[in-house]
Image (spheres, rainbow, N blue to C red):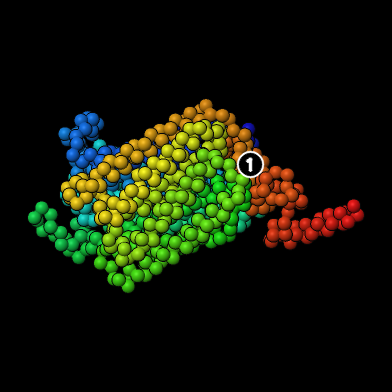
Amino acid sequence: MSTLAVHDHGLVHHEEGHEHHHKATFLNTYVFSQDHKMIAKQFLITGITMAFIGMLLSLLFRIQLAYPDKSFPLLETLLGRFAPGGRLSPDFYMSLVTIHGTIMVFFVLTAGLSGTFANLLIPLQIGARDMASPFVNMLSYWFFLIASIIMVSAFFVEKGPASGGWTIYPPLSALPTAMPGSAEGMTLWLISMVCFIASSLMGGINYVSTVLNMRTKGMDLWKMPLTVWALFLTAVLGVLAFPVLVAGVVLLIFDRSFGTSFYLSDIVLNGKVMPFEGGSPILFQHLFWFLGHPEVYIIIMPAMGISSEVMSVNSRKPIFGYHAMVYSLIGITVLSFIVWGHHMFVTGMNPFLGGVFMITTLIIAVPSAVKTFNWLATLWRGNIRFTPAMLFAIGMVSFFISGGLTGIFLGNAALDINLHDTYFVVAHFHLVMGSAAIFGMLAGVYHWFPKMFRRMMDDRLGYLHVWVTFVGAYLVFFPMHFMGLEGVPRRYYAITEFHQWDHWLNVNTFITWAAIMSGFAQVAFIINFVYSIFWGKKTVQNPWNANTLEWTAPIEHIHGNWIGELPTVYRWPYDYSKPGHEEDFIPQNVPFSQTMSSNMPHDFEDNPEGLEEFNKWTSTQKANEEVK
């Protein structure tokens, strides 16, 4: 058996006698694989594992919020010194909030989402054999796995994991003696994040290089699916924004370990004046949020691309406003770098500067609104198939709209001063970023599961999963808006310490039980996922009758994706339900010469020869009709 050496546009050379260098073993097939499809599965399974850890942490601190004055002996059995007498310690409560946020934002919604679908879809949808650098691609996964292990290992150090919130603001993060979670756990957090950012940079550079250099013949930028556009621009965002957080983390390590004062000044700890002066914690906030707001779009843009693809396929309609969708993604990418200050309206920022950030924040709502309108127009009068993937994609749009509307409140500096650090903020970002991105990710899992594992997921368990999760997410986060409007602060260990908020305790209890209900729905997903990998119904090559190139690749996975030459692309990826064609879809690799009865003049915008042929064919058809 020969190996395939890959060149642009599918030129393939057979190197006889070279196969002994590439013997398939368990290690190089499943562990240290350089095949983008296997790396996508590794990212997905690691991301799902981290998601369950993050979910369990949230359920633990939700129990504390619902029953702040009760003891649960089981907690002491499970958590030991972190839950003396069956109640979470206040320090450990803060650690749970911190690690939950970190895991969900970075390890699930960034690496789990982008790592899975960029690896799976970019080579397959642009007609490439693999990533530009398969070895660096493998390294990006292993750095992600190492970062995940380090982050979770903080639960096993003496003073527990990092505290201070997922934003790790100084001085709590800069003074190792400030609280238990500022000690070794914070050091592990910083090391983990450096490894994570290294992973993201290696992956991002690979994704950008692959899209720019390895598209197959005929695949110009305006023939790329919206998934590839979204993943490509996400990678650009990550490559530009993540290094700023590395700089912030390095300066933080200097303050923690070498006595510098980048973020510290005039600190009094336990009655003792510390020898720090000249620094400012606001500097860290600027560095963190310069990444932090692009990070919001690093999370949501892949979900947007995935949902666009799933909605078009299952509406049996072309995506509405393809060019507007691409330009709105580009607009979001550019604008996301000039809105970070809206996280800092209450830091004493110059009101004029606050006004500038408020204006850019409200402007960035425009491309988001364009996308929302286009999704709704795509669904309008479509021949919709309500698969689990389609329901998750529609749910993503629902969360994006309802969560995005509350962003208008928080983007206004005058209103944000009252709402900042209340439950209103928790509700906003868990809907617009957390729930919407999770639903986009799950839409992708259900839609491309046959491509990843060559089997189908069970639809009945899928419907149970989507509806319980959808209802549960709204029951959890919607009531928090009203808590925030009354000023109930987030991250408080027990709001009953302040009697003016006692009446919200029943709401907290209701939210906790809704979260538990949503957690059980994820158990149904895991059962479906694992069962379907091994015993699910075997798939056909193109189970959804989709147009994109990944469904033209063989069902059996081969390292190189296609046997022989790579497919040539002739058309955009959304030729659904074209009048005059027998079927309601036309794959991208079908030449226009084979679909003359359904061709339209705008199909040949960049192809004058094709337009000339089409005009000749049209003239011939008219002449034949006149003769008849």
Q: Please state if 115 lies on the left or on the right of 317 as rendered.
A: left
Q: Residue furthest front?
A: 503
Of residue 161 and residue 372, the one placed in the foreground of this image is 372
Rendered position, 252 above or below 96: below
What's the residue type where badge 1 is placed?
A: Asn
**Residue at 19% across / 44% down in the picture?**
90
Q: Please state if 77 lies on the left or on the right of 608 as rendered.
A: left
Q: Residue furthest bottom?
A: 352
Q: Is residue 111 visible?
A: no
List the residue tagged with mark 1. Answer: 545
Of residue 8 and residue 245, the one placed in the foreground of this image is 245
Percent coordinates x, y for residue 131 in the rendering: 53, 47
Percent coordinates x, y for residue 340 in the rendering: 36, 62
Percent coordinates x, y for residue 614 in the rendering: 77, 57
Q: Is residue 420 visible?
A: yes
Of residue 408 and residue 347, the one placed in the foreground of this image is 408
**Residue at 41% across / 36% down in the picture?**
522
Of the 4 image quadrants, the one containing the N terminus is top right
Rendering quarter of residue 290: bottom left
